[in-house]
Each structure stands twice: as C-alpha cells, then as structure tokens.
Image (cartoon, helix red, strand yellow):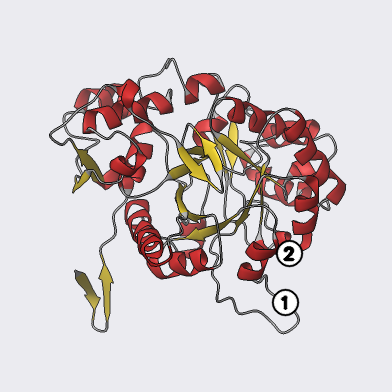
C-alpha cells in the first residue's frame, strides 16, 4: 500500500529489523535439533554468518579462525593488507589517531598502491593456514585483479560496491565490468552486491552469481544513508530480494543464496533477517569486538578512505571476548552479542524451525515496541537490551 508524500509523489512503507518480531508456531523443538547448515557457491558451512570484508574485521588470521569455527570471513583485497607488506604499524596508526584527523589519515594510508603480489600472498597465507579463501573487491578491482585472484587459488570472490547493477552507464573512456561475462569466465563462484530491490536482485541472479548481498547503508560504521540519502531498511530489502530468489529458482531450478549485509548486531537481528528470507548474513562490528580482530577495538567502513566523498567513519566497539565466544559461546554478555550460533539455534527451536528453509517461513509481525516494551529498568540502568 502506497502512502502519499505530496501531490505527484507516493511511497511504499519499508520496515527495518527493529520494527518486526517473530511469532512462535504450534511446534517447538530442542535447539540441538536445529540444523543451521547452508551452502554458498558450493561451499558448505555450519554457521550462516560471514564476516564483512573490512580491514578492522578480517585479516589472514581471522579468515582462518572463522573457517575453523564453521563460519566464513572475507578479506578486502583493496585494503591495507594488499597495500602494505606489514600492515601492523598501519593498524596501530589507525587505532591511535584522534577523530578529527581520522578521515585525512585514512585517505593518506589508502593512497598507497595495491600490490598484485600481495593479493596472491594473502590468498596463499589463508589457504596454507587451512582457511577458506573468500576475498572481495569493487567492480573496478574485479576487472583489474580478477585473473590474479583466480590464479592464486581463491575459493570464492565477492564483488561489492554501495550499489551494483547490470545496467551501468559510464563515460566513453571507461569500460564497465560486464558482470555476466565475469561470472562466466571466473573459475570460482562469484557473489555480487549490494542491492535492495526485487528487480536488481533478479537481474544479478541472471548473471550467474552464486549469491547476492542485500543492504545499502545499514552498517554500524557506514554513513552512505546520510551522505547519499540512499537505502532501504533491511527487513523489507531482504524480503524483496528473497522473493526474487524464489521466483528465479522456480523459473530456472538454480538457487542463488541471499545474504543480508549490514545493520545486524545481535543474535535476534540475525534470526529476523533469516525469517525475512535470507540464507545467511554478513556482519562486521560484532566481529570487530573479538580479541583476535585486527582493528584493536575499532571498526571502520569500506568507503571511509574515499579521496573524493568519504561515506564511512570509525567507531569504537571495544573488545568483549574471543571470536569463539562471540560466534559459538559460551556467552559472557546478556545483550545478544555473544554466542550468535546458540541464539540462532535457540530461536529456531522456539519457533519450531528444523532448518534454515523452515526458519524462512516463520510468521513475522510488525512490532515497533518489541525492543522497548517492559524494558524501562534495563534502559534506565543501561543493562541487557538497554545498553
């Protein structure tokens, strides 16, 4: 149902994750029976959670650890790990600078050229550590470094930008990346994003993508929505793009994974995204809080270093526990940011969903008071859900 904004302009109501709630059905099950396994690009994982390709979240060590724990971490191939042979002093500078000097420092640090030999080296290091080599670039980076990534033996390639579409207009002097040709020619699965609409999601699936990323601007450190005014709240965006996946599957028999990317902090957020239709989620700031994370308690957006129009900031997230505690528990915090897998399993048990496909079918209601109803004391004392 459209709402009239003014004469000649109407709009559809969209919903964010905080505005919805999941409704238990007639059946419950023991959380140990909840099957959270999923597949992306032929890669089987126990946990449907991917760590974002952000320099403060995933380095070689984190990529290996996430693989060992049953999840997946994506390395940013246009970040500091492919610009500097030793990124540790760079990470120290990023963590130590003040807020006013941060953006200019980032622009300076990321002006260092990307070195193709470091792309190959980082992929090799992940593989030698026993990890899944999932890597990411922008479309321009994919065009330039795609052959290097393939030759290095990466397992899966994420091509990401604020918005990716198959209908990209560019100046005559620039040859845009042909997404269909790229997906066909790459010897490894390709994931494309980001998008937020049914039509664009469907078009990206037709390119041969193994998965699509859904989300524009909801990330904790992203400022795209403020800078550009662009975005669709995640609950609606995920539901729309998941509908495209289901229609595409009915038409072709090909299943393309939908990954909700950004804006998810707690286990409840992850559960609600999957209930809206996502097969998996991509998160950044929750993993940036791990003791093993390279950001030293900080998290920053991928577009922060832009030399022309920065669309991200650096936020202090602190360190709350080990990566294992955050991902698999046992939890030491009561706010839903530890033991994300346990939260998903328990929610599935409460809702009676035996696997991810059943979780995608649970009832959802509009519930703007879900996080505030009866939580006066938590809010006043900044405990639990009131933090």
Which quadrant of the figure contains the C terminus? Answer: top left
Q: Which label belongs to residue 143?
A: 2
Q: State the residue at coordinates (19%, 28%).
A: 28
Between 98 and 219, the one nearer to me in the picture: 219
Q: Which residue is mark 1?
A: 175
Instruction: Compute the Cα span from label 1 to label 2.
Output: 10 Å
Q: Dot 1: what SS?
A: loop
Tell me whether circle 1 and circle 2 mark residues in contact (CB < 8 Å): yes
Left or right: 216, with 29 as reference point? right
Q: Position of residue 18 (x, y in %)?
A: 30, 43
Q: Dot 2: what SS?
A: helix
Which quadrant of the figure contains the N terminus? Answer: bottom left
* Residue extending furthest toward the front: 253
Q: Does the image show residue 100?
A: yes
Q: State the residue at coordinates (46%, 51%).
A: 257
Between 330 and 319, the one nearer to me in the picture: 330
Left or right: 251, with 315 as reference point? left
**On screen, residue 45 above or below 13:** above
Q: Specify few, some or many for label 1: CA neighbours under 10 Å numbering under 14, 14-19, or 20 or more.
A: few
Q: Position of residue 136 (x, y in %)?
A: 66, 50
Q: Does the image show residue 294?
A: no
Q: Quadrant of residue 357?
A: top left
Q: Specify few, some or many for label 2: CA neighbours under 10 Å numbering under 14, 14-19, or 20 or more.
A: some
Q: Position of residue 202 (x, y in %)?
A: 44, 67
Q: State the residue at coordinates (77%, 46%).
A: 109
Q: State the residue at coordinates (64%, 36%).
A: 58
* Residue extending furthest toward the left: 26
Between 99 and 37, the one nearer to me in the picture: 37
């Amino acid at each position: 149902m459209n709402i009239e904004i003014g004469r000649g302009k109407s709009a559809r109501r969209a919903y964010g994750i905080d505005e919805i709630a999941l409704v238990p059905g007639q059946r419950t099950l023991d959380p140990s029976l909840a099957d959270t396994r999923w597949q992306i690009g032929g890669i089987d994982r126990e946990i449907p959670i991917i760590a974002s390709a952000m320099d403060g979240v995933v380095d070689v060590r984190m990529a290996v650890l996430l693989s060992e724990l049953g999840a997946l971490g994506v390395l940013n191939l246009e970040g500091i790990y492919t610009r500097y042979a030793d990124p540790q002093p760079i990470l120290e500078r990023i963590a130590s600078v003040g807020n006013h000097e941060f953006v200019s420092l980032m622009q300076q640090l990321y002006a260092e050229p990307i070195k193709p030999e470091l792309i190959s080296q980082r992929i090799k290091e992940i593989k030698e550590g026993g990890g899944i080599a999932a890597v990411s670039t922008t479309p321009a980076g994919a065009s330039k470094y795609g052959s290097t990534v393939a030759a290095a033996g990466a397992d899966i390639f994420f091509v990401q930008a604020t918005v990716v579409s198959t209908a990209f207009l560019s100046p005559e002097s620039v040859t845009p990346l042909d997404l269909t040709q790229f997906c066909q020619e790459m010897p490894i699965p390709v994931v494309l994003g980001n998008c937020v609409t049914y039509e664009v999601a469907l078009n990206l699936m037709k390119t041969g993508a193994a998965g699509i990323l859904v989300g524009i601007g909801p990330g904790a450190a992203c400022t795209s929505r403020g800078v550009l005014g662009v975005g669709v709240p995640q609950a609606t965006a995920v539901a729309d793009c998941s509908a495209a996946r289901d229609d595409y599957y009915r038409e072709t028999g090909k299943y393309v994974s939908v990954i909700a990317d950004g804006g998810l902090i707690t286990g409840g957020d992850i559960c609600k995204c999957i209930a809206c239709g996502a097969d998996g989620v991509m998160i950044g700031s929750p993993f940036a809080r791990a003791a093993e994370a390279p950001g030293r308690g900080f998290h920053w957006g991928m577009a922060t270093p832009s030399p022309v129009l920065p669309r991200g900031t650096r936020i202090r997230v602190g360190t709350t526990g080990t990566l294992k505690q955050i991902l698999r528990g046992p939890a030491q915090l009561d706010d839903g940011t530890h033991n994300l897998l346990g939260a998903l399993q328990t929610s599935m048990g409460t809702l009676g969903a035996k696997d991810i496909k059943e979780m995608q079918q649970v009832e959802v209601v509009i519930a703007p008071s879900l996080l505030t109803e009866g939580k006066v004391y938590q809010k006043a004392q900044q405990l639990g859900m009131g933090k």
